[in-house]
Image: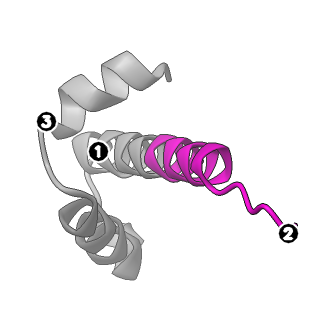
Amino acid sequence: MQLQKAKEIVGNQDTQSLRNMVKALSMLTALNTPEDWERLEAAKIVIKARNKNLKASLNKNYIVDWR
């Protein structure tokens, strides 16, 4: 699944809401519908992309001059 499609599925939600969604959908997977599985996968993709972007921006902005 592509990131753009994942964003369309989960909508404009903050990261903590997505983490809560992943936790809830992962608790009792036997009751998940196909739509739930799709939302679970999409939420994981969006969270991973946000974490990757956050780490990249932190590394780029964190320059220490030890002189």
**Residue neighbourhood size for the residue with mark 2, other residues' Cα within 10 Å, grouped as few (<14), some (14–19), many (≥20):** few
Which label lies toward us, 1 or 3?
3
The x and y percentages for residue 14 are 18, 56
Q: Classify mark 2: helix, strand or loop.
A: loop
Quarter occupied by the C terminus: bottom right
Residue sitting farthest toward the bottom: 27
Task: Name the foreground residue: 61 vs 35.
Answer: 61
Q: Is residue 7 left or right of residue 42?
A: left
Spatial separation of the CA atoms under disc 1 and disc 3: 10 Å
Q: Is residue 63 in the magenta section?
A: yes
Mark 2–mark 3 CB contact (< 8 Å): no
* Identity, as a three-letter code, of the amino acid under mark 1: Arg
**Residue neighbourhood size for the residue with mark 1, other residues' Cα within 10 Å, grouped as few (<14), some (14–19), many (≥20):** many
Which label lies toward us, 2 or 1?
2
Decide which of tag 1 and tag 3 comes sooner along the chain. 3
Spatial separation of the CA atoms under disc 2 and disc 1: 46 Å
Residue at the spot 32% in from the left edge and 68% down from the top edge: 19
The mark found on residue 66 in the picture is: 2
Q: Which residues are magenta?
A: 48-67
* Identity, as a three-letter code, of the amino acid under mark 3: Gly
Residue at the spot 24% in from the left edge and 40% down from the top edge: 35
Spatial separation of the CA atoms under disc 2 and disc 3: 43 Å
Q: Classify mark 1: helix, strand or loop.
A: helix
Decide which of tag 2 and tag 3 comes sooner along the chain. 3
Residue sitting farthest toward the left: 12
The x and y percentages for residue 8 are 21, 24
Residue at the spot 54% in from the left edge and 44% down from the top edge: 57
Q: Would you name the residue on which mark 1 appears?
A: 39
